Amino acid sequence: MTSISDLPPELLCLIAGRLHTAVDVVRFDAVCRAWRDTLHAMPPPPQQQPPPALLPWLVAPTSDDDDTAAAGVACRCVFSKTSYHAPGLCVQDKRVAHADGTGSWFINGLFVNPLTAMTDTDASRYPWDFIDREGFSQRIVSGDGTFLVYRLEDTYGSLSLIGESWSLYVREGNWVEKTLGAADGYYVVVACHGGAILCADLANCYIYKKELPWHYHTTFMPLPDEPGKVRQRSYLLECRGELLLASVLQDAGCTDDDDRLSVSVHAFDVDAALHALNPDSAVDHNELRAAPVWEKRDDVLGDHVLFLGFPGSFAVEAARFGGDVPGGGAYFVVKSEPCRVYKYSFEDDGAAATLVETLPAGWNDERCMWFLPEPVIAGISASTKMQQVGRHWSFWERPRRRRPRNLRFHVGRLSPTVDSSRLREMYSKHGKILLN
Amino acid sequence: MAAATDDAGDSNEMIRVVSSDGEHFEMPEAAANLSLVLRHMIEDDCADAAGIPLAVVAAKPLAKIVDYCTKHAAKSSGLTIEEAEELKRFDAEFIEVDTDMLYDLLVAADFMGVEGLSKLAVQRTADLIKGKTPEQNRETFGIVNDFTPEEEEEICKENEWAFQITKPPSRLC
């Protein structure tokens, strides 16, 4: 009897390529050898096409409540409706948001995969004891690889951002101290972009750039106006080399938390903003009105999907999900008990965001982080060294495995007299032939 | 046994094909052209009254494929929204087959180079796999677990999270 497991490898590859949730891929890997081998023989994506990605997961902030925290950190995939509790990470929020969409825990100086507890950094490169001691509880990695750790400090009713940054593991001595004024820390998001550190709340975007002589002033740009709407949340993210501000808006006059929500996106030109803010440039301000600081971007995001979260957000080319999620939309989490995940489509102008899922009980803090899962498929991890962080933080090494790849040839326009034995004869000098 | 030819579009040339078990089928040229292999044979003037032999495609899947190609060839260009919807419905019903037939269709569509059907069968297979545990997938597809217990343990350890997750009852078929 024939069965799907007898399918030629290239067909199994096509089938596996249609799976876009991490849990389906990992379970596919565990069915039998033929299926497991398939995932090792997946052909690389054609050139100029983005590599496939698995649909993102959400990870909740660490709970202050001991009982909830003891159950582990909650992770959820709203696309496959699966949940997982990562054990043993309940002391402090350890999340790191990476601009490329991946996510990790920051534990003892290592970036640890939230689902598999694997790490691909081979040494402790960051002074984690210092970072923990200083209480830098928020962590982000920007598109250019800058690692920023920070905390928000409220002194005498005035909020400050205090942090430290590293570019490519080199400590820049980049002690950040930026006064944000009377901002509400609960709503502040932070991003690094082009050598500047940006913080946005619901009204302003604050800019910190080290080399500017006037950086210690409260330099900020008001966020763009949204007539008839009220800004509920601001998010900063990088996409195609630009810094974007994504705002979750609600129609003015709505009373329910999740009634008539929408998302608008603006590109934020940091240089133009600094120019406009520079007291020295005010002298000849007539010729300096050139570049606008905010430029609407909703209409050009058709290829991308935005995942808005905390401490960081990201944009992904929709093609990476193989059509499972349409482009031109944004996913975000709305406060509620439990919180709700909404999706807004930039194409349906005027339509409100739609509910994707009400999260399971216990998901009461909306400052969730999205991340693209990177499950372990033995032998195909890109990193040279993979380690798993165990419950007692002991490490063991994993051997690196490689398997031979099957090549497939299409031979066309043959005379009808050529049969399989003739084909075998023609090609056997090049290697073992598997004819289907 | 001949396939339905009523809605064959404007090509009146009929192409004959012969399954591996000797059954004869015919379909309009436009339908045969949806198969890369058949198209090349027609271009090379290999389509004659005796029929094109398809050595690896048995009668059962071939009948389905002839059906699929005939339907799709008749409605290939300039579809109205309703026609596109109808074709979609046809596809959805067409691919509601058991796993043995699905296997045959996957192999045959791939061999004959019928791209649309290949995609349809691949997607259907992936949809059957989705949301199932490894054990449920083995059951659905009649697969023997050929891992040693040690290997199985290693696989589970690699991605422990995927085997411990909580989930509402899965959509079984």
Image: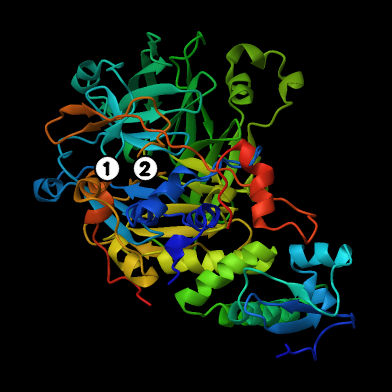
Residue at 38% in and 77% down: B173
- Position of residue A146 measured from the top left corner of the image (x, y, whole percent): 44, 21
How crowded is the residue under tag 1: few (<14 C-alpha within 10 Å), some, or many (20+)? some
| Amino acid type at mark 2 | Ile
Q: Residue at x 57, y 82 (%)?
A: B93
Up-down: is A101 above or below A393?
below
Q: Nearer the viewer, residue A252 or B147?
A: B147
Q: Position of residue A355 (x, y in %)?
A: 43, 65
Q: CA distance from mark 1 to mark 2?
A: 8 Å
Answer left or right for B1 relative to A212. Answer: right
Judging from the image, mark 1 belongs to the subunit labelled B
Choose between A82 and B134: the one closer to the eye.
Answer: B134
Task: Give the chain of mark 2.
Answer: A
**Image marks 1 and 2: residues in contact by CB distance under 8 Å:** yes
- Disc 2 crowd, CA 10 A, few/some/many (<14, 14-19, 20+): some
| Rendered image: mark on residue A377 | 2
Q: Whole-percent x and y of residue B42?
A: 85, 68
Split into 4 quadrants, where in the image is the C terminus of chain A? bottom right
Q: Amino acid at mark 1?
A: Glu
SS state under label 2: loop
> Which residue: 36% across, 13% down?
A175
Q: Which residue is mark 1?
A: B158
Q: Is residue A259 visible?
A: no
Residue B73 placement: quadrant: bottom right
Q: Is residue A320 visible?
A: yes
